[in-house]
Image (cartoon, grey):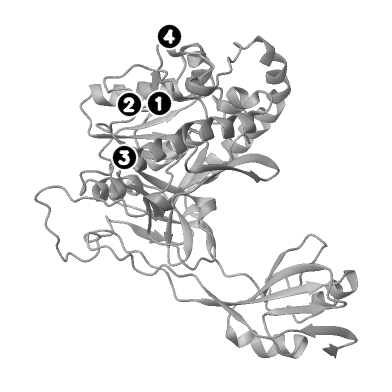
Amino acid sequence: MNSNNDMEIRNTCTNNVSVGDGKGKTIKLRLLNESYLPYIRSKLGSFTLKVEEHGGGVQDIDEWTGMPEWKVNDDKWYLINLTLQGKKERDWVESWDWSENPKGCIKLTDKTNKLWYPYAPDVYSTTDCWITPKKVIPKYPIYVISKGRSNTRLTSDALVEMGVEHYLVIEEQETDQYIKDGCNKELLLILPKELCNLGQGGIPVRNFVWNHSVANGDKRHWILDDNMDGFYRFHDNRRTKVNSGVCFRVIEDYVDRFKNVYQSGMQYYSRLPNISKARKMIQHNTKVYSCILMQNDCPFRWRGRYNEDVDLSLRILKAGYPTMLFNMFLCYKAQTMSIVGGNTDGIYSVKDAFQLKLDSLIAQHPDVVKPTVLAGHAHHNVNWKPFEKNKAILIDGYERTNEGTNEYGMVYVPDYYEKVDTYEKSRITKAKRKAERIESKAAKSKAKAAKPKIVQTTGDDWMRLTTPFPFEDDR
Protein backbone atom coordinates (compact mmCIF):
# COMPACT_ATOMS: atom_id res chain seq x y z
CA MET A 1 0.00 0.00 0.00
CA ASN A 2 1.28 3.50 -0.79
CA SER A 3 -0.06 7.00 -1.25
CA ASN A 4 0.02 9.65 -3.94
CA ASN A 5 -1.29 13.15 -3.27
CA ASP A 6 -3.26 11.89 -0.30
CA MET A 7 -4.70 9.04 -2.38
CA GLU A 8 -4.53 5.58 -0.81
CA ILE A 9 -3.15 3.18 -3.43
CA ARG A 10 -3.51 -0.58 -3.01
CA ASN A 11 -1.33 -2.67 -5.32
CA THR A 12 -1.26 -6.41 -5.87
CA CYS A 13 1.13 -8.74 -7.63
CA THR A 14 -1.28 -8.74 -10.57
CA ASN A 15 -2.53 -5.92 -12.78
CA ASN A 16 -5.16 -4.88 -10.21
CA VAL A 17 -4.78 -1.49 -8.53
CA SER A 18 -7.28 0.10 -6.14
CA VAL A 19 -7.53 3.77 -5.25
CA GLY A 20 -9.33 4.20 -1.94
CA ASP A 21 -10.60 1.41 0.28
CA GLY A 22 -10.44 -1.27 -2.42
CA LYS A 23 -14.17 -1.13 -3.11
CA GLY A 24 -15.84 0.73 -5.94
CA LYS A 25 -16.09 0.83 -9.73
CA THR A 26 -13.42 -1.06 -11.68
CA ILE A 27 -12.23 0.59 -14.88
CA LYS A 28 -10.13 -1.12 -17.54
CA LEU A 29 -7.30 1.40 -17.97
CA ARG A 30 -5.26 0.81 -21.12
CA LEU A 31 -2.03 2.55 -22.09
CA LEU A 32 -1.65 3.49 -25.73
CA ASN A 33 1.96 2.30 -25.69
CA GLU A 34 4.84 1.51 -23.35
CA SER A 35 6.20 5.06 -23.34
CA TYR A 36 3.42 6.16 -20.98
CA LEU A 37 4.24 3.51 -18.39
CA PRO A 38 6.68 5.64 -16.28
CA TYR A 39 4.08 8.36 -15.82
CA ILE A 40 1.35 5.88 -14.81
CA ARG A 41 3.73 4.18 -12.36
CA SER A 42 4.44 7.58 -10.82
CA LYS A 43 0.74 7.80 -10.08
CA LEU A 44 -0.16 4.22 -9.20
CA GLY A 45 3.10 2.77 -7.92
CA SER A 46 4.19 -0.79 -8.62
CA PHE A 47 1.96 -3.28 -10.40
CA THR A 48 2.12 -6.02 -13.02
CA LEU A 49 0.96 -5.09 -16.50
CA LYS A 50 -1.15 -7.30 -18.69
CA VAL A 51 -0.11 -7.05 -22.33
CA GLU A 52 -2.83 -7.24 -24.98
CA GLU A 53 -2.25 -7.71 -28.70
CA HIS A 54 -4.63 -7.33 -31.58
CA GLY A 55 -3.51 -10.71 -32.91
CA GLY A 56 -4.69 -12.50 -35.99
CA GLY A 57 -1.76 -11.91 -38.31
CA VAL A 58 -1.68 -13.63 -41.68
CA GLN A 59 -4.35 -16.27 -42.11
CA ASP A 60 -2.78 -19.72 -42.23
CA ILE A 61 -4.51 -20.98 -45.36
CA ASP A 62 -2.62 -21.88 -48.50
CA GLU A 63 -5.53 -20.98 -50.77
CA TRP A 64 -5.47 -17.26 -49.92
CA THR A 65 -3.41 -16.39 -52.98
CA GLY A 66 -4.36 -13.83 -55.57
CA MET A 67 -6.52 -12.18 -52.90
CA PRO A 68 -6.34 -8.80 -51.08
CA GLU A 69 -3.88 -8.33 -48.25
CA TRP A 70 -5.00 -9.17 -44.72
CA LYS A 71 -3.00 -6.82 -42.54
CA VAL A 72 -3.11 -6.57 -38.76
CA ASN A 73 -0.47 -4.38 -37.13
CA ASP A 74 1.56 -5.51 -34.14
CA ASP A 75 0.49 -2.82 -31.68
CA LYS A 76 0.42 -3.84 -28.04
CA TRP A 77 -1.70 -2.30 -25.32
CA TYR A 78 -1.12 -2.46 -21.59
CA LEU A 79 -4.05 -3.15 -19.30
CA ILE A 80 -4.58 -2.20 -15.66
CA ASN A 81 -7.74 -3.01 -13.73
CA LEU A 82 -8.18 0.23 -11.81
CA THR A 83 -10.76 0.30 -9.01
CA LEU A 84 -11.86 3.79 -7.90
CA GLN A 85 -13.72 4.14 -4.61
CA GLY A 86 -15.83 7.17 -5.48
CA LYS A 87 -16.01 10.72 -6.85
CA LYS A 88 -12.88 11.90 -5.00
CA GLU A 89 -10.83 9.16 -6.63
CA ARG A 90 -12.38 9.82 -10.05
CA ASP A 91 -11.59 13.53 -9.71
CA TRP A 92 -7.99 12.61 -8.91
CA VAL A 93 -7.64 10.58 -12.12
CA GLU A 94 -9.20 13.48 -14.05
CA SER A 95 -6.44 15.72 -12.66
CA TRP A 96 -3.69 13.68 -14.36
CA ASP A 97 -1.84 15.11 -17.35
CA TRP A 98 -4.25 14.65 -20.25
CA SER A 99 -2.62 17.26 -22.50
CA GLU A 100 -2.08 14.71 -25.32
CA ASN A 101 -5.75 13.78 -25.33
CA PRO A 102 -7.52 15.54 -28.23
CA LYS A 103 -10.02 16.98 -25.74
CA GLY A 104 -7.31 18.01 -23.28
CA CYS A 105 -9.21 16.41 -20.42
CA ILE A 106 -11.49 13.51 -19.52
CA LYS A 107 -14.69 13.09 -17.53
CA LEU A 108 -15.35 9.99 -15.42
CA THR A 109 -18.72 8.95 -14.01
CA ASP A 110 -19.86 6.09 -11.83
CA LYS A 111 -20.76 4.28 -15.07
CA THR A 112 -17.35 4.60 -16.75
CA ASN A 113 -15.89 1.12 -17.28
CA LYS A 114 -12.98 1.71 -19.66
CA LEU A 115 -10.38 4.39 -20.22
CA TRP A 116 -7.37 4.92 -22.50
CA TYR A 117 -4.28 6.89 -21.55
CA PRO A 118 -3.76 9.37 -23.01
CA TYR A 119 -6.26 8.56 -25.79
CA ALA A 120 -7.73 5.60 -27.66
CA PRO A 121 -6.04 4.30 -30.83
CA ASP A 122 -7.59 5.48 -34.08
CA VAL A 123 -9.36 2.39 -35.41
CA TYR A 124 -12.39 4.04 -37.01
CA SER A 125 -12.48 6.11 -40.16
CA THR A 126 -15.46 8.31 -40.96
CA THR A 127 -14.16 10.15 -44.03
CA ASP A 128 -11.64 7.78 -45.67
CA CYS A 129 -12.74 5.17 -48.18
CA TRP A 130 -11.65 2.21 -50.30
CA ILE A 131 -12.71 2.70 -53.92
CA THR A 132 -12.09 0.93 -57.23
CA PRO A 133 -11.58 3.41 -60.10
CA LYS A 134 -12.66 0.62 -62.43
CA LYS A 135 -16.06 -0.77 -61.49
CA VAL A 136 -15.97 -4.20 -59.85
CA ILE A 137 -19.21 -6.15 -60.34
CA PRO A 138 -20.34 -9.03 -58.08
CA LYS A 139 -20.76 -12.35 -59.89
CA TYR A 140 -23.94 -13.40 -58.13
CA PRO A 141 -27.30 -11.64 -57.68
CA ILE A 142 -27.91 -9.66 -54.51
CA TYR A 143 -31.36 -9.71 -52.91
CA VAL A 144 -32.30 -7.23 -50.19
CA ILE A 145 -35.48 -8.33 -48.44
CA SER A 146 -37.55 -5.45 -47.06
CA LYS A 147 -40.91 -4.91 -45.39
CA GLY A 148 -42.40 -1.73 -43.94
CA ARG A 149 -39.20 0.28 -44.48
CA SER A 150 -39.94 2.31 -47.57
CA ASN A 151 -38.36 5.38 -45.98
CA THR A 152 -35.45 3.60 -44.29
CA ARG A 153 -33.89 1.61 -47.10
CA LEU A 154 -30.44 1.55 -45.51
CA THR A 155 -29.00 -1.47 -47.35
CA SER A 156 -30.45 -0.61 -50.74
CA ASP A 157 -29.29 3.02 -50.47
CA ALA A 158 -25.78 1.85 -49.53
CA LEU A 159 -25.67 -0.45 -52.56
CA VAL A 160 -26.92 2.30 -54.86
CA GLU A 161 -24.17 4.59 -53.56
CA MET A 162 -21.65 1.80 -54.25
CA GLY A 163 -22.97 1.31 -57.78
CA VAL A 164 -24.00 -2.29 -57.05
CA GLU A 165 -27.03 -3.69 -58.85
CA HIS A 166 -29.48 -5.59 -56.67
CA TYR A 167 -33.07 -6.62 -56.15
CA LEU A 168 -35.13 -4.94 -53.44
CA VAL A 169 -37.70 -7.61 -52.60
CA ILE A 170 -40.98 -6.28 -51.18
CA GLU A 171 -44.59 -7.33 -50.70
CA GLU A 172 -47.08 -6.36 -53.38
CA GLN A 173 -49.26 -4.10 -51.23
CA GLU A 174 -46.25 -1.89 -50.38
CA THR A 175 -45.14 -1.23 -53.96
CA ASP A 176 -46.74 2.21 -54.30
CA GLN A 177 -45.36 3.38 -50.95
CA TYR A 178 -41.79 2.36 -51.80
CA ILE A 179 -41.99 4.19 -55.13
CA LYS A 180 -43.57 7.22 -53.45
CA ASP A 181 -40.69 7.33 -50.96
CA GLY A 182 -38.15 7.53 -53.75
CA CYS A 183 -37.25 3.93 -54.49
CA ASN A 184 -36.23 3.22 -58.07
CA LYS A 185 -38.95 0.88 -59.32
CA GLU A 186 -36.39 -0.88 -61.53
CA LEU A 187 -34.88 -2.34 -58.34
CA LEU A 188 -38.13 -3.85 -57.10
CA LEU A 189 -38.85 -7.58 -57.12
CA ILE A 190 -42.45 -8.09 -56.02
CA LEU A 191 -43.53 -11.10 -53.98
CA PRO A 192 -46.56 -13.07 -55.20
CA LYS A 193 -49.78 -12.34 -53.30
CA GLU A 194 -49.83 -15.77 -51.70
CA LEU A 195 -46.54 -15.02 -49.94
CA CYS A 196 -47.54 -11.61 -48.58
CA ASN A 197 -48.63 -10.82 -45.01
CA LEU A 198 -48.36 -14.40 -43.81
CA GLY A 199 -47.07 -13.46 -40.36
CA GLN A 200 -44.22 -15.96 -40.77
CA GLY A 201 -41.29 -13.55 -40.66
CA GLY A 202 -38.77 -13.66 -43.49
CA ILE A 203 -38.95 -17.38 -44.28
CA PRO A 204 -41.35 -17.21 -47.27
CA VAL A 205 -39.40 -14.39 -48.95
CA ARG A 206 -36.05 -16.07 -48.29
CA ASN A 207 -37.14 -19.25 -50.02
CA PHE A 208 -38.78 -17.22 -52.80
CA VAL A 209 -35.55 -15.43 -53.72
CA TRP A 210 -33.67 -18.73 -53.54
CA ASN A 211 -36.09 -20.23 -56.09
CA HIS A 212 -35.82 -17.03 -58.15
CA SER A 213 -32.04 -17.35 -58.28
CA VAL A 214 -32.20 -21.07 -59.13
CA ALA A 215 -34.66 -20.33 -61.96
CA ASN A 216 -32.16 -17.81 -63.36
CA GLY A 217 -29.44 -20.45 -63.42
CA ASP A 218 -27.23 -18.87 -60.75
CA LYS A 219 -24.71 -20.92 -58.79
CA ARG A 220 -25.07 -18.75 -55.67
CA HIS A 221 -27.02 -15.77 -54.41
CA TRP A 222 -26.62 -13.09 -51.77
CA ILE A 223 -29.46 -12.42 -49.33
CA LEU A 224 -29.17 -9.25 -47.25
CA ASP A 225 -31.23 -7.72 -44.47
CA ASP A 226 -32.51 -4.21 -45.17
CA ASN A 227 -30.96 -2.49 -42.13
CA MET A 228 -27.27 -2.27 -43.07
CA ASP A 229 -25.80 1.22 -43.41
CA GLY A 230 -22.76 0.45 -45.53
CA PHE A 231 -19.91 -2.03 -45.92
CA TYR A 232 -16.35 -1.79 -44.58
CA ARG A 233 -12.89 -3.26 -44.99
CA PHE A 234 -10.87 -4.19 -41.92
CA HIS A 235 -7.25 -3.44 -42.77
CA ASP A 236 -4.30 -2.42 -40.60
CA ASN A 237 -6.58 -2.34 -37.53
CA ARG A 238 -8.95 0.17 -39.12
CA ARG A 239 -12.52 -0.20 -40.31
CA THR A 240 -12.90 1.87 -43.47
CA LYS A 241 -15.91 2.18 -45.73
CA VAL A 242 -15.88 0.47 -49.14
CA ASN A 243 -17.60 2.30 -51.99
CA SER A 244 -17.49 -0.53 -54.51
CA GLY A 245 -18.90 -3.99 -55.17
CA VAL A 246 -15.40 -5.38 -54.61
CA CYS A 247 -16.29 -6.54 -51.08
CA PHE A 248 -18.82 -9.00 -52.54
CA ARG A 249 -16.61 -10.08 -55.44
CA VAL A 250 -13.62 -11.02 -53.26
CA ILE A 251 -15.74 -13.34 -51.11
CA GLU A 252 -17.40 -14.86 -54.17
CA ASP A 253 -14.08 -15.60 -55.87
CA TYR A 254 -12.63 -17.19 -52.77
CA VAL A 255 -15.53 -19.49 -51.86
CA ASP A 256 -15.79 -20.56 -55.51
CA ARG A 257 -12.47 -22.34 -54.98
CA PHE A 258 -14.33 -24.87 -52.82
CA LYS A 259 -17.08 -27.32 -53.62
CA ASN A 260 -18.69 -27.71 -50.20
CA VAL A 261 -18.93 -24.16 -48.81
CA TYR A 262 -22.68 -23.74 -48.98
CA GLN A 263 -22.84 -20.72 -46.69
CA SER A 264 -20.51 -17.74 -46.24
CA GLY A 265 -20.81 -14.03 -45.59
CA MET A 266 -19.60 -10.87 -43.89
CA GLN A 267 -19.05 -10.28 -40.19
CA TYR A 268 -20.88 -7.46 -38.40
CA TYR A 269 -18.95 -4.21 -38.03
CA SER A 270 -19.83 -4.23 -34.32
CA ARG A 271 -18.57 -7.79 -33.78
CA LEU A 272 -14.94 -7.12 -34.69
CA PRO A 273 -13.52 -5.64 -31.47
CA ASN A 274 -10.81 -2.98 -31.30
CA ILE A 275 -8.61 -5.43 -29.41
CA SER A 276 -8.59 -9.15 -30.00
CA LYS A 277 -6.06 -11.88 -29.35
CA ALA A 278 -7.41 -14.45 -31.78
CA ARG A 279 -9.31 -12.65 -34.53
CA LYS A 280 -8.60 -14.27 -37.89
CA MET A 281 -9.34 -13.18 -41.42
CA ILE A 282 -12.03 -15.87 -41.65
CA GLN A 283 -14.00 -17.45 -38.82
CA HIS A 284 -14.68 -21.01 -39.80
CA ASN A 285 -17.70 -23.11 -38.85
CA THR A 286 -19.90 -20.61 -37.07
CA LYS A 287 -23.15 -18.76 -37.66
CA VAL A 288 -23.44 -16.58 -40.78
CA TYR A 289 -26.03 -13.85 -40.56
CA SER A 290 -27.70 -10.88 -42.29
CA CYS A 291 -25.23 -10.62 -45.21
CA ILE A 292 -25.17 -14.17 -46.55
CA LEU A 293 -23.86 -15.83 -49.71
CA MET A 294 -25.72 -19.11 -50.27
CA GLN A 295 -24.79 -21.85 -52.73
CA ASN A 296 -27.99 -22.73 -54.56
CA ASP A 297 -27.58 -26.51 -54.50
CA CYS A 298 -27.37 -26.53 -50.69
CA PRO A 299 -29.47 -29.49 -49.46
CA PHE A 300 -31.16 -27.33 -46.79
CA ARG A 301 -33.57 -24.40 -47.01
CA TRP A 302 -34.97 -21.75 -44.70
CA ARG A 303 -37.61 -22.99 -42.23
CA GLY A 304 -39.48 -22.10 -39.04
CA ARG A 305 -40.10 -18.50 -37.98
CA TYR A 306 -37.38 -17.30 -35.61
CA ASN A 307 -33.56 -17.44 -35.69
CA GLU A 308 -33.59 -18.87 -39.19
CA ASP A 309 -29.97 -17.85 -39.76
CA VAL A 310 -28.69 -19.80 -36.73
CA ASP A 311 -30.87 -22.78 -37.62
CA LEU A 312 -29.64 -22.95 -41.21
CA SER A 313 -25.98 -22.60 -40.18
CA LEU A 314 -26.39 -25.39 -37.64
CA ARG A 315 -28.04 -27.78 -40.08
CA ILE A 316 -25.26 -27.17 -42.62
CA LEU A 317 -22.57 -27.73 -39.99
CA LYS A 318 -24.23 -30.83 -38.55
CA ALA A 319 -24.15 -32.37 -42.03
CA GLY A 320 -20.36 -31.96 -42.01
CA TYR A 321 -20.11 -28.93 -44.29
CA PRO A 322 -18.06 -25.82 -43.38
CA THR A 323 -19.18 -22.21 -43.15
CA MET A 324 -17.04 -19.10 -43.60
CA LEU A 325 -17.57 -15.75 -41.89
CA PHE A 326 -15.24 -13.10 -43.33
CA ASN A 327 -13.66 -10.50 -41.03
CA MET A 328 -11.91 -8.76 -43.91
CA PHE A 329 -15.19 -7.19 -45.02
CA LEU A 330 -17.85 -6.05 -42.58
CA CYS A 331 -21.49 -5.02 -42.82
CA TYR A 332 -22.69 -2.13 -40.66
CA LYS A 333 -25.94 -3.61 -39.39
CA ALA A 334 -28.39 -1.80 -37.13
CA GLN A 335 -29.32 -3.60 -33.93
CA THR A 336 -32.19 -6.08 -34.30
CA MET A 337 -35.58 -4.51 -33.44
CA SER A 338 -34.11 -0.97 -33.41
CA ILE A 339 -35.74 0.15 -36.67
CA VAL A 340 -39.48 0.24 -37.35
CA GLY A 341 -40.62 -2.23 -39.99
CA GLY A 342 -39.34 -5.68 -40.91
CA ASN A 343 -39.72 -8.24 -38.14
CA THR A 344 -39.78 -5.43 -35.55
CA ASP A 345 -43.43 -4.75 -36.38
CA GLY A 346 -44.21 -8.40 -37.13
CA ILE A 347 -43.10 -11.54 -35.36
CA TYR A 348 -40.94 -9.60 -32.87
CA SER A 349 -43.87 -7.42 -31.78
CA VAL A 350 -45.72 -10.22 -29.99
CA LYS A 351 -45.54 -10.77 -26.25
CA ASP A 352 -42.47 -12.70 -25.06
CA ALA A 353 -40.84 -12.52 -28.52
CA PHE A 354 -37.36 -13.07 -27.07
CA GLN A 355 -38.52 -16.19 -25.25
CA LEU A 356 -40.28 -17.49 -28.35
CA LYS A 357 -37.09 -17.04 -30.37
CA LEU A 358 -35.13 -18.95 -27.75
CA ASP A 359 -37.70 -21.74 -27.43
CA SER A 360 -37.84 -22.27 -31.18
CA LEU A 361 -34.09 -22.72 -31.49
CA ILE A 362 -33.89 -25.08 -28.51
CA ALA A 363 -36.71 -27.15 -30.03
CA GLN A 364 -34.74 -27.40 -33.28
CA HIS A 365 -31.28 -28.00 -31.78
CA PRO A 366 -31.48 -29.10 -28.12
CA ASP A 367 -28.08 -30.78 -28.38
CA VAL A 368 -26.10 -27.55 -28.91
CA VAL A 369 -28.39 -24.69 -27.85
CA LYS A 370 -28.81 -23.62 -24.23
CA PRO A 371 -30.67 -20.67 -22.69
CA THR A 372 -28.88 -17.60 -21.41
CA VAL A 373 -29.60 -13.91 -20.79
CA LEU A 374 -28.23 -11.10 -22.95
CA ALA A 375 -28.95 -7.41 -22.36
CA GLY A 376 -31.72 -8.38 -19.96
CA HIS A 377 -33.52 -10.64 -22.46
CA ALA A 378 -33.79 -14.37 -23.01
CA HIS A 379 -31.18 -15.41 -25.56
CA HIS A 380 -29.52 -18.48 -27.02
CA ASN A 381 -26.04 -19.79 -26.32
CA VAL A 382 -24.78 -22.07 -29.10
CA ASN A 383 -21.94 -24.54 -28.71
CA TRP A 384 -20.03 -24.39 -32.01
CA LYS A 385 -17.13 -26.60 -30.88
CA PRO A 386 -18.51 -29.88 -32.31
CA PHE A 387 -18.04 -28.43 -35.81
CA GLU A 388 -14.46 -27.19 -35.51
CA LYS A 389 -13.12 -29.98 -37.76
CA ASN A 390 -15.47 -29.37 -40.70
CA LYS A 391 -13.15 -28.81 -43.65
CA ALA A 392 -13.56 -26.90 -46.90
CA ILE A 393 -12.73 -29.10 -49.92
CA LEU A 394 -11.14 -27.54 -52.99
CA ILE A 395 -12.87 -27.98 -56.33
CA ASP A 396 -11.51 -30.66 -58.63
CA GLY A 397 -8.62 -29.42 -60.68
CA TYR A 398 -7.78 -26.44 -58.50
CA GLU A 399 -4.03 -25.90 -58.23
CA ARG A 400 -2.42 -23.89 -55.48
CA THR A 401 -0.31 -21.05 -56.82
CA ASN A 402 1.94 -18.40 -55.36
CA GLU A 403 0.34 -15.38 -56.95
CA GLY A 404 0.87 -13.05 -54.01
CA THR A 405 -1.79 -10.44 -53.28
CA ASN A 406 -4.40 -8.97 -55.58
CA GLU A 407 -6.11 -5.81 -54.36
CA TYR A 408 -8.80 -6.06 -57.07
CA GLY A 409 -8.05 -2.45 -57.97
CA MET A 410 -8.85 -1.15 -54.48
CA VAL A 411 -7.37 2.28 -53.74
CA TYR A 412 -7.35 3.87 -50.28
CA VAL A 413 -8.51 7.49 -50.49
CA PRO A 414 -8.07 9.67 -47.35
CA ASP A 415 -10.87 12.18 -46.73
CA TYR A 416 -12.83 10.76 -49.66
CA TYR A 417 -16.16 11.86 -48.21
CA GLU A 418 -14.95 15.43 -47.80
CA LYS A 419 -14.30 15.51 -51.54
CA VAL A 420 -17.60 14.19 -52.89
CA ASP A 421 -21.14 15.42 -52.42
CA THR A 422 -22.88 12.05 -52.59
CA TYR A 423 -21.94 11.08 -49.05
CA GLU A 424 -23.32 14.23 -47.44
CA LYS A 425 -26.46 14.04 -49.52
CA SER A 426 -27.03 10.45 -48.47
CA ARG A 427 -26.54 11.39 -44.81
CA ILE A 428 -29.05 14.23 -45.06
CA THR A 429 -31.55 11.90 -46.70
CA LYS A 430 -31.08 9.27 -43.99
CA ALA A 431 -31.43 11.88 -41.22
CA LYS A 432 -34.68 13.04 -42.79
CA ARG A 433 -35.95 9.48 -42.98
CA LYS A 434 -35.04 8.91 -39.36
CA ALA A 435 -37.15 11.93 -38.36
CA GLU A 436 -40.02 10.64 -40.47
CA ARG A 437 -39.65 7.22 -38.89
CA ILE A 438 -39.95 8.66 -35.40
CA GLU A 439 -43.00 10.70 -36.39
CA SER A 440 -44.74 7.71 -37.91
CA LYS A 441 -43.98 5.28 -35.08
CA ALA A 442 -47.07 6.26 -33.08
CA ALA A 443 -49.29 5.92 -36.14
CA LYS A 444 -47.87 2.48 -36.89
CA SER A 445 -48.52 1.37 -33.34
CA LYS A 446 -52.18 2.34 -33.68
CA ALA A 447 -52.44 0.45 -36.95
CA LYS A 448 -50.85 -2.63 -35.44
CA ALA A 449 -54.19 -4.07 -34.35
CA ALA A 450 -55.33 -4.14 -37.96
CA LYS A 451 -52.47 -6.38 -39.05
CA PRO A 452 -53.03 -10.10 -39.67
CA LYS A 453 -52.90 -12.13 -36.50
CA ILE A 454 -49.63 -13.98 -36.01
CA VAL A 455 -50.33 -17.64 -35.33
CA GLN A 456 -48.05 -19.10 -32.66
CA THR A 457 -46.56 -22.53 -33.30
CA THR A 458 -44.73 -24.93 -31.07
CA GLY A 459 -43.05 -28.32 -31.13
CA ASP A 460 -42.84 -29.96 -34.53
CA ASP A 461 -44.34 -26.89 -36.21
CA TRP A 462 -40.99 -25.12 -35.73
CA MET A 463 -39.54 -27.62 -38.19
CA ARG A 464 -42.08 -26.93 -40.91
CA LEU A 465 -40.85 -25.31 -44.11
CA THR A 466 -43.07 -22.45 -45.21
CA THR A 467 -42.34 -22.49 -48.94
CA PRO A 468 -42.23 -25.60 -51.15
CA PHE A 469 -38.98 -26.33 -52.93
CA PRO A 470 -37.54 -29.24 -54.88
CA PHE A 471 -35.40 -30.73 -52.10
CA GLU A 472 -36.39 -33.25 -49.48
CA ASP A 473 -37.62 -32.13 -46.08
CA ASP A 474 -34.46 -32.35 -43.94
CA ARG A 475 -35.98 -32.69 -40.52
Amino acid beneath label 1:
Arg
Q: Position of residue 112 (x, y in %)?
A: 76, 63
Distance between the Cα atoms at labels 1 and 3?
21 Å
- Numbered mark located on residue 319 in the image: 3
Whichever of callouts 2 and 4 sits on the residue coming sooner in the sequence is 4
Distance between the Cα atoms at labels 2 and 1?
6 Å
Look at the numbered disc 4 and give the secondary structure of its residue.
Answer: helix
The reply to whether callout 1 and callout 4 are in contact (CB within 8 Å) is: no
Residue 87, by quadrant, is bottom right
Q: Residue at x 73, y 22 (%)?
A: 442
Whichever of callouts 1 and 4 sits on the residue coming sooner in the sequence is 4
| Residue bearing the label numbered 2 | 210
Badge 3 crowding class, 10 Å Cα cut-off, few under 14, some 14 to 19, many 20 or more, is: few
- Numbered mark located on residue 206 in the image: 1
The reply to whether callout 2 and callout 1 are in contact (CB within 8 Å) is: yes
Q: Nearer the viewer, mark 4 or mark 3?
A: 3
Towards the viewer: 223 or 138: 223
Amino acid beneath label 4:
Glu
- Residue 183 seen in the figure: no
